[in-house]
Image (cartoon, helix red, strand yellow):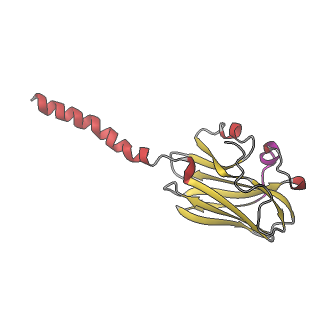
Amino acid sequence: MHSITRAALIGAAALPLAMAAPSLASASTAADVTFTYSASGSTVSNTITNNSGGALQCSTSLANAPGGVLPPIEATIGPGQTIYESGVIPTGTTVQTINDIPDGSYVVLASCGSVDEPTSMWVSDYPGLEPYLAMFPYTTYAVQQASWVVSLPSAGAPTSTPGMNFGS
């Protein structure tokens, strides 16, 4: 009788662990989402690669960059961005495109958040971003593709150093 009781207890203990294993395996990581920006004429595109295992709500937005210089983060997120494209991004690769952008200098920003629980958020890296990410009550990641400044109309290349990481 003791071996039956022992087997029942081991089975009862193992069941919650087995049920938790799929959620542990699907936990988000910083590398689950990547952004790749491009610009041509009056259009800015963001190629979003979503390897998170679920749909994400993503936004690609532009903020003014006076003089073609990356502004302090407070000047960018404080007033918000009025030029943007957003939508639900399935797993795989999707391009968000913003068309008919007025000539000028802009900083390109991107962010994605999980649609289902547990909530995770990925944001293009930016100097001074970390304290703002810490305010969110869920898992946040600064994506290696940093926000960059582009002057439109554009010939297609960012004006900042490609691959430059602004610290995360």
Q: Residue 79 in the image: x percent, y percent?
A: 81, 48
Residue that sits furthest to the right in the current view:
67
The image quadrant where one finds the N terminus is: top left
Q: Residue 3 in the image: x percent, y percent?
A: 12, 31
Quick check: is 157 in the magenta stretch? no
Image position of 12 (left or right of 108)? left
Which quarter of the figure has residue 151?
bottom right
Up-down relation of residue 3 to residue 59 (above or below): above
Image position of 111 (left or right of 105)? left
The image quadrant where one finds the C terminus is: top right
Image position of 81 (left or right of 104)? left
Q: Residue 89 in the image: x percent, y percent?
A: 58, 61
Tell me where the magenta segment starts and ends, as one range.
74-83
Residue 71 or residue 57, whichever sits in front: 71
Q: Residue at x 23, y 34 (%)?
A: 10
Q: Which residue is drawn at 70% across and 61% down?
A: 37
Image position of 90 (left or right of 154)? left
Residue that sits furthest to the top in the current view:
2
Q: Which residue is drawn at 16% across and 31% down?
A: 5
Q: Residue at x 54, y 53 (%)?
A: 32
Which quarter of the figure has residue 6?
top left
Q: Residue 72 in the image: x percent, y percent?
A: 82, 44
Count every numbered label the image shows and give the total: 0
